[in-house]
Amino acid sequence: VRMRKMQTQATELVRDFYESLLMLTLGLLLQWNQWHVVRILNADTLPAEVTEQQPLNWSAVFFSSGLLLTLLQYRPQWIKRCSLQLRKLLLLLEVLIVLFVVDYVLLSIWQPFLNIFDLVLHTLGNSQGSWSRLVFHYCPGLADWLINDAFYFMRFLISLAWFLIAIELAAPKWRLAIDFLVLGQLPE
């Protein structure tokens, strides 16, 4: 009985691992090709400035991957008790919902939030106060950097930090599944 329970636990662990990898891969594929579930379902609800195709940036890929890793930790556990056909249907529904949430957060919350930082950096770069004249006198390239490159650098660092934190938080659960796949048994 104990062995059967451990086998069931191990198969659920591996299935969760594979399903999480599937969702993460789909999210990366969609983000890499800039296909957004939100735009497919209802493009009228997005702000006007987001409707044009943006060039690929790694910060969006890192942020969406970090958000996917964060969301995958909170997958519903009651699906495991359903039949196989219902579980597959619920997995498809879960994939669509998670990808929709990631796109919604990325397009409707994250990018407008970053635009605030872009405006702040432009304001700092164009400021004419006494302190800014002193700083820009000794660092002449600082104003150009604040106006042109600081926003992209900050966006990349914040997204990379979010991604690394999400990997660190998801690692214990995934490490257990990988240990099972490598060792062939659940670690004690």
Image: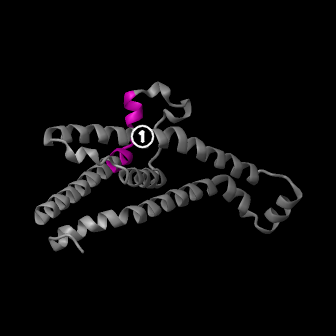
Residue 72: where, in percent of width, then height? 35, 51
Q: Residue at x 24, y 39 (%)?
A: 90
Residue 103: x and y in percent read: 43, 40
Q: Nearer the viewer, residue 4 or 138?
A: 4
In the image, 113: left or right of 9?
right
Left or right: 169 with respect to 20?
right
Q: Residue drawn 37% across and 36% down?
A: 37
- Compared across the picture, whether 64 is left or right of 85 comes to right
How would you classify the magenta stretch by its main secondary structure? helix
Q: Which residues are magenta?
A: 28-41
What is the residue that sits farthest to the top in this orientation? 44
Percent position of residue 60, x then y: 46, 50
Q: Please state if 174 lies on the left or on the right of 135 as rendered.
A: left
Neighbours of disc 1 within 10 Å: few (<14), some (14-19), many (20+) = some
Residue at 34% in and 44% down:
30
Residue 180, above or below 154: below
Front residue of 31/177: it is 177
Number of callouts: 1
Where in the figure is residue 155, as x and y percent of width and height?
Answer: 56, 54
Q: Nearer the viewer, residue 50 or 10?
A: 10
Q: Name the quarter where the N terminus is drawn.
A: bottom left
Q: Is residue 83 magenta?
A: no
The answer to whether residue 58 shows anywhere in this view is yes
Residue carrying label 1: 101
Say whether residue 33 is magenta.
Answer: yes
The image quadrant that residue 183 belongs to is bottom left
Residue 35 shows up from this direction: no
Looking at numbered disc 1 in the image, what kind of residue is underneath it?
Val
Q: Secondary structure at mark 1?
A: helix
Q: Quadrant of the C terminus?
A: bottom left
